Amino acid sequence: MSLRTITTPDAPAAIGPYAQGVVANGLLFTAGQIALDPATMQVVAGDVAAQTEQVMTNLAAIARAAGATLADVAKTTVFLADMADFQAMNEVYARHFGDARPARSTVAVRGLPRDVRVEIEAIIRVASA
């Protein structure tokens, strides 16, 4: 099995020893995306809805770089700093996925990188290369 690393300037550069995404056996596994603006590498201002907007934009950019879209997402895992943010996150999430309904797990965590409110990772089907 070969692995293909995905990188794009349209999503935040890795802030540690990991890849934005890796394709293996027709699936793209993304790193968890937080609300970093790829141009500035700063957390976007605003509440969990604003942060979720940036997270979804970042995920879409990584998917695009691998030749996929959010419609190809099979599974996501959402990490929330506070489960009280679920509804606001979910509204933005649903809008970005439209009619697509990937499987999802949502968990509350004690803390996230750079004190963000939300982090999302995805498993995405990609065309064979």
Image (cartoon, rainbow, N blue to C red):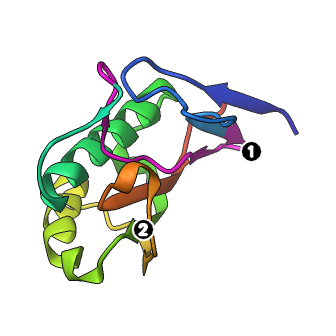
Say whether residue 5 is magenta. Answer: no
Query: Are the two marked residues, 1 and 2, in contact with CB atoms closer than 8 angstroms?
Result: no
Tell us which disc is closer to us: 1 or 2. 2
Q: Residues within 10 Å of mark 1 (few under 14, many from 20)?
A: some
Identity of the residue drawn at 33% across and 67% down? 101
Q: Which residue is mark 2?
A: 79
In the rendered image, the vertical position of residue 44 relative to residue 11, given as above or below: below
Quadrant for the C terminus in the image = top right
Tag 2: residue type? Phe
Say whether residue 27 is magenta. Answer: yes
Q: Which residue is mark 1?
A: 25
- Relative side of 57 to 78, left or right: left
Q: Position of residue 6 (x, y in %)?
A: 59, 27
Identity of the residue drawn at 21% across and 70% down? 90
Which is nearer the N-term, disc 1 or disc 2? 1
Secondary structure found at label 1: loop
Residues shaded magenta:
23-40
